[in-house]
Image (tube, rainbow, N blue to C red):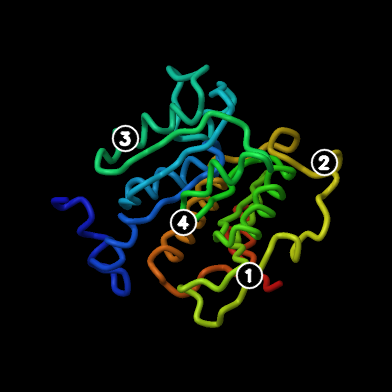
Amino acid sequence: MGSRYERNILVKDFGAAGQAALQNARIGVLGAGGLGSPVLYYLAAAGAGYLKVVDFDAVEESNLQRQILHDTERIGWRKAESAARTLRVLNPEITVDTVCERVDADNAARIFGDVDVVVEASDNMETKFMLADYCETSGQPLVWGSAVGMQAMVTTFASRPLAADPSEKTATLRELYPQLPDPQTTPTAATQGVLGPLVGVAGSLMAMEVIKIVCGIPGVLVRRLALIDVRETGVRLVEF
């Protein structure tokens, strides 16, 4: 291990026990784009023992202003494979698996059934709802984020109480959004744009949610929505 994780271990309430829990964790991330890039990068750097990168898309030039796992030479690569290349170079001590296929209700259990925490970092509301429904049934905690323009939101859904949450709160996506929003009127990065630093902030917060969950650190955003506004340089917590 050497000195790679010594700054982690020095942190109060994390320490060697937290590092060991993180190294034993299995984390699945849907999306290796704007949000998925900082999530995966920081989890890999911190020493998450197993990362499963799930993404069907290929790297495009328009991705590169925010998707920091990829570079110009990898335009045309599958994002999952490009992400894995970056993460393995960053931290050769971890295991990175890739899945280059679309996730749907029929294959979600096969793809994510072997991980402890699922991260939803796609840019598609239908996919977000589908994965949230799967995690509600499976009982796996779901770290969830969305970013458009200069605003983002992050929360964690858990249909079973988390070890990190002594109040034993639970929450599901359909308590926040009872119905799938109309895709024709819902703003997306493809229609409204998104700034790179915004997804960096939101993705970093999502990575921290994963770390708190697997290491049993209190303060997970269950029933709380973090609203990030980089124009105002602020984060507001809203309970639901």
User: Label 2 is placed on what type of residue?
Assistant: Pro
- Residue identified by numbered label 1: 224
Residue carrying label 2? 183
Q: Which mark is residue 177?
A: none
The reply to whether dot 4 and dot 3 touch (C-beta < 8 Å) is no
Measuring from the top left, give residue 79's x and y in whole percent. Answer: 50, 28
Callout in the foreground (4, 1) = 4
Q: Amino acid at mark 1?
A: Arg
Give the number of the disc on residue 116: 4
Name the residue at 41% across, 72% down: 217
195 vs 52, left or right, is right
Mark positioned earlier in the residue sequence (1 or 2): 2
Residue furthest to the bottom: 167
CA gap between label 4 and label 3 equals: 21 Å
In the rendered structure, which disc, 2 or 3, sits on the residue that comes first in sequence?
Answer: 3
**Foreground pick, 102 / 209:** 102
Residue 119 in the image, given as x and y percentages of width and height: 54, 50
What residue sits right under mark 3 in the picture? Answer: 88
Is residue 15 placed above or below 104 in the rendered structure?
Answer: below
Q: Secondary structure at mark 2?
A: loop
Nearer-N-terminus badge (4/3): 3
Amino acid at the residue labelled 4: Asp
